[in-house]
Image (cartoon, rainbow, N blue to C red):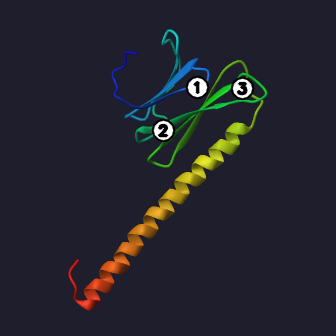
Amino acid sequence: IVDEGAFCSTTFDAAQNYLAVGFLEGDVKIYQADNFKLLQQKQGAHSLSAAALAFITGLEDETQTVCSVSGDYSVHIMKIGKSAGGSRLWVVALVVIVLAFLIANVALKLEDHGRDIIIQQNIAKGTEL
């Protein structure tokens, strides 16, 4: 694959027919795995790097859905295949991904808050960290 940008994430679909690549500039590209022909691309899909990618296979049709996420809390969906409709499995996966990001964000904030409380208690006691 020849591209000017640096990539930060890649993934194949389950059948290894497609390769999705996420770039540091936030672009997402999908290639045919056997010959690396560019099938689809979305420039500027994210304002930060495309940190993670996942293929979601449709159950009722031959549609592949690529879901990309970024540190800016954005989620981008790209469909490839014979049909654009059909399975709504990607909706469930999208909800799970968004919830995972929200839970991780809350956990990090709680960890920081807990650390601040411990520091304040140590300062009040006059002890060093």
- Which residue type carries mark 1? Asp
Q: Is residue 94 above or below residue 16?
A: below
Residue receiving disc 1? 13
For numbered disc 2, what is the local secondary structure?
A: strand
- Which residue type carries mark 3? Ala
Where residue 18 appears, x then y in whole percent?
A: 56, 20
Residue at image position (69%, 24%) is 63
- Quadrant that contains the C terminus: bottom left
Label 3 and label 1: CA atoms lie apart by 17 Å
Where residue 10 appears, x then y in whole percent?
A: 46, 29
For numbered disc 3, what is the local secondary structure?
A: loop
Residue receiving disc 3? 84
Q: Quadrant of residue 110?
A: bottom left
Residue 52: which disc?
2
Mark 3 in CB contact with mark 2 (< 8 angstroms) = no
Q: Residues within 10 Å of mark 3 (few under 14, many from 20)?
A: some
Relative side of 61 to 113, left or right: right
Taking depth in this image into account, of 79 and 15 the one nearest to the observer is: 15
Q: Nearer the viewer, mark 2 or mark 1?
A: 1
Label 2 and label 1: CA atoms lie apart by 14 Å
Relative side of 9 to 19, left or right: left
